[in-house]
Amino acid sequence: MNSHTYDYLDGNAAAGELSEIFAMDVTIAEAQCAHCGAIMRFAEAHLYMQAPGVVARCAVCEHVLLRFVKARQRAFLDLRGMTCLILDTSQLQESG
Ligand SMILES: [Zn+2]
């Protein structure tokens, strides 16, 4: 009953790609899965990089959390698999 035959990395592997879009490190943020409601660190997500982009799946239910594809001069970011992305802003106050 294994529906996913590809190997995956953990969400930390998305840090480089996503740093082009987000000023903050998303991999240390918490994400709530829109499918099962689990809240976990994005770094714990299962990251599939065999596709023409990056696909992050929930570590609990394997539903898609995030898709990120770069094509030509555009980046496509699909976050509909997440109900919420919770970022820790405490680090930002240092530089203020
Ligand atoms: Zn889930």
Image (spheres, grey):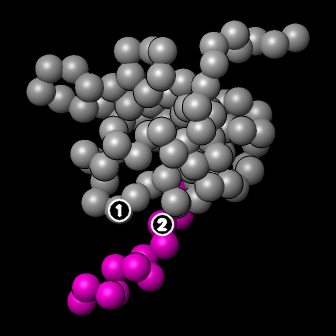
Front position in the image: 77 or 50: 50
Q: Amino acid at mark 1?
A: Met
Is residue 51 highlighted in magenta? no
Q: Is residue 43 left or right of residue 19?
A: right
Q: Position of residue 59 (x, y in %)?
A: 71, 38
Q: Is residue 86 magenta?
A: yes
Residue 82 lies in what quarter of the image? top right
Task: Work out whether mark 2 precedes mark 1 in sequence or the reverse, and give the earlier one.
Answer: 1
Q: Residue at x 69, y 55 (%)?
A: 39
| Residue drawn at point x = 34 percent, y = 87 percent | 93
| Residue receiving disc 2 | 87
Stretch in magenta: 85-96
Image coordinates of residue 81 in percent, x first then y, are 56, 38
Q: Quadrant of the C terminus?
A: bottom left
**Local crowd size for mark 1, using a 10 Å CA cut-off: few (<14), some (14–19), many (≥20):** some
Helix, strand, or loop for circle 1?
loop
User: Label for residue 24?
Assistant: 1
**Is residue 45 shown above or below 73?**
below
Residue visible at 14% across and 20% down in the picture: 72
Q: Is residue 26 above or below residue 86?
A: above
Closest to the camera, between mark 2 and mark 1, is 1
Q: Is residue 63 above or below residue 39?
A: above
How many angstroms separate mark 2 from mark 1 (CA)? 8 Å
Q: Do the residues under discs 2 and 1 have CB atoms within 8 angstroms?
A: yes
Give neighbour class at mark 2: few <14, some 14-19, many 20+ (Cα, 10 Å).
some
